[in-house]
Amino acid sequence: MSDIAAAVDVLQRGGILAHATEGVWGLACDPHNAAAVQRLLKIKMRPEEKGLLLLGGSAAAFAPQLDALERSDRQSIEATWPGHVTWILPDTEYPSWVSGGRKTVACRVPDHDQARQLAEGMQRPIVSTSLNLAGEEPIRSYAEALVQFAQIVDLVLPGEIGLADGPSKILQLQDTGIQSLR
């Protein structure tokens, strides 16, 4: 079984895994598995109200969210993917434990092959939030992920982060243009 297949199996069984992304390590689970998301939030010491980010294997994974937009806005977003850019998009499909109770959801198609392959293997977006405890710096190496999280998560997927500097930029469409949230 390949590393990706083993990781997808962990996600499908309701597990949590650590994985590399473009600029930091991520903590992933199935967004539709309430127990997995609650466990992930507990590990991170993160309140549900903050919401979580979703990674998709391609823009098509976010068709319901993108279809709610004007064509020009959709094209602008799709032009940034794959990339190190997360967009806040309209949503009615994800549970409140993902959206933080909002009518929006944070979506990204990462510019990191392994992270995209995880979502493609699940055949739907996955939750992926930075691998760190609340208030601490995100993990940037496989060795550090193993030391700090191997006993806490179900799998630390071997890999390396990309060349990006830190977590992704978060953008939101506004009537006046694009607003950067991070």
Image (tube, helix red, strand yellow):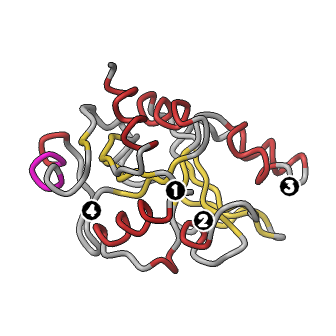
Type of the residue with mark 4: Asn
The majority secondary structure of the magenta stretch comes to: helix
Residue beneath label 2, please? 180
First in sequence: mark 1 vs mark 4: 4
Q: Is residue 53 left or right of residue 162?
A: right
Label 4 packing within 10 angstroms: few (<14), some (14-19), many (20+)? many
In the current view of this chain or complex, which residue is farthest to the top? 1
Residue beneath label 4, please? 132
Q: Position of residue 38 (x, y in %)?
A: 41, 69
Q: For the magenta stretch, what is the residue range?
A: 145-149
Label 1 packing within 10 angstroms: few (<14), some (14-19), many (20+)? some
Residue beneath label 1, please? 169
First in sequence: mark 1 vs mark 3: 3
Locate the N terminus by quadrant. top left
Residue beneath label 3, please? 69
First in sequence: mark 4 vs mark 2: 4
Q: CA distance from mark 3 to mark 4?
A: 33 Å
Q: CA distance from mark 4 to mark 2?
A: 23 Å
Circle 3 SS class: loop
Label 2 packing within 10 angstroms: few (<14), some (14-19), many (20+)? few
